[in-house]
Amino acid sequence: MNDVSLMIGLETHVQLNTKTKAFCACKNPVNLPEEAEPNTLTCPVCLGLPGSKPTCNKRFVELASKVAIALGAKLAKDTFFSRKTYFYPDMSKNFQTTQYEVPLASGTTLKIIPDCKKDIRLRRIHMEEDPAKLIHAGTHTLVDYNRAGIPLIEIVTEPDFRSPKEARNYLQKLAQILAYLGVYDPMSDASIKTDANISIQGGERVELKNITGTKEIERALSYELLRQKNVLRRGAKVVQETRAWKPETGVSKALRTKETEEDYGYIFEPDLSRITTNDAFSKKISFGMPELPDTRRARFIKQYNVSGKMAESLTSEKELSDLFELACKKAKPDVSATWVGIVLAKTLNYNNLTMKSSGMKNEWVIELIHAFQNKEYSDQTAERILRKMVGNKCGYHVAVNKYNFPKLGEGANISEMAKKVVSANKKAVDDYKAGESKSLNFLIGQLIRESRGSIDAEGAKKEILKQIS
Ligand code: ADP
Ligand code: ZN
Ligand code: MG
């Protein structure tokens, strides 16, 4: 399949982490450490009781504008909310408060991979509210209105993606920027939901609803692409429809033939005041904007002389990049980069953590890097210390005291060990003497292992050579 005939466009909803909901004073559940009892974070406004009147949360407009400006979009000078009318129990007012005619911001593109020409055009960025959560339990459906009224920002792209992988890269880039801005909870998959529109040549567009998180998108789109190709292969037609993605089974299921936006009958929301923005407002929002990942990545390459790939890893998370810069004040940039961008990144990833969620303190890691640079530990030992630190959420000194990690050249009698390794591996010694240089590496590895990391590769080589020459 020639990918040029494949078109994908995404509509992504992000729950913003304001203290209170979009149009009432209820607590925003996104910020609570534990999930609240159903329907406890509600009031007449978010329950849609007759006569209740919404007011717009100022912080909502500010955070949404912060995202829009960070993405390079232009804020509308004058915009407003609209009612998207529909009947469904997840929105008891019988309409969703959203923006339709004039979005909060528009007119920008997002580069999904640094140094790559591919730009995705963003069609619109607007504000709306989350509907309630429906829980299907056997023959009953339960409604939890805690979610009703969570402020959302919706980011809609043009159909510029040519593969499921590109769609995934885009979502990851977007999530990275949002995490830098600190406007959402990156640890919760529920905080980003995407509707994906996908079509192939000769067929109409299908909308896949409610794909959660950033990873699932590639799987959902790959499945749907295959399904559409098979429909065409059978000589049938792909019809325009809305389908639900079912992550448990890995298939999409038809929901309804696709309605168009016009079918909803949007009307102006008279209970909320208009939103006007001016240069002073944009300036205020831009002030205190953190350095964004692509800019930071480029600066790291220049300032610390690290490779593009390393800079990418270091800036994958804001907290990780902050740690790297702090470490550079105490240790060499190349050593700091290796320990933060490779070893720590790998260890966090293995434990399904981020620097932010790990509870690790910057000083802990910096002390370890410092000790390694001062040749207190071999790289193997230092890595094992780091694993204990991450696993036990503890400092460098705590880990070292608790687990008794050997210092370089400490304790064990290295030449005794080297003797042992040499006599236990006669064949490798003979091979080495016959010109097989790989055998020396083998012996060095054996000695490092034997010493439990109290000797590094350089020291091990010296000892082995001493024994066999
Ligand atoms: P609707 O108003 O029905 O939601 P839009 O025209 O606003 O439809 O488009 C919604 C999304 O669908 C956008 O992200 C857009 O990029 C995408 N889209 C539009 N046409 C196509 C297509 N032919 N194939 C894939 N995606 C498309
Ligand atoms: Zn409320
Ligand atoms: Mg739509």
Image (cartoon, rainbow, N blue to C red):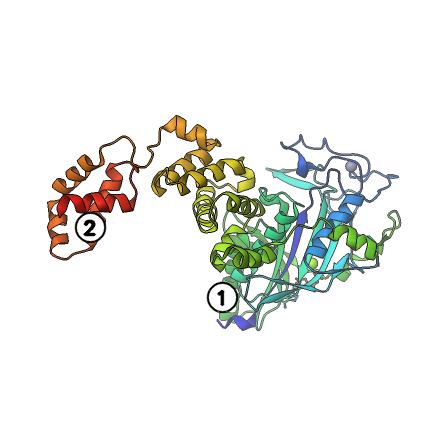
Identity of the residue drawn at 17% across and 44% down? 466
Residue found 86% across the figure and 39% down from its top: 52
Instruction: Answer yes or no: is residue 98 visible.
Output: no
- Relative height, residue 37 to residue 328 (above, below): above
Q: Mark 1 points at which residue?
A: 230
Image position of 210 (left or right of 65): left
Looking at the picture, which amino acid does disc 2 mark?
Leu
Answer with left or right where residue 312 lies relative to residue 11: left
Lower sequence index among marks 1 and 2: 1
Q: Position of residue 274 (x, y in %)?
A: 87, 52
Nearest the eye: 462 or 74: 462
Distance of label 1 from label 2 (alpha carbons): 56 Å
Give ligand 1's quarter of the image.
Answer: bottom right
What residue does disc 2 label?
440
Q: Where is residue 137 in the image (x, y as percent from the top left)?
A: 60, 37
Q: Residues within 10 Å of mark 1 (few under 14, many from 20)?
A: some
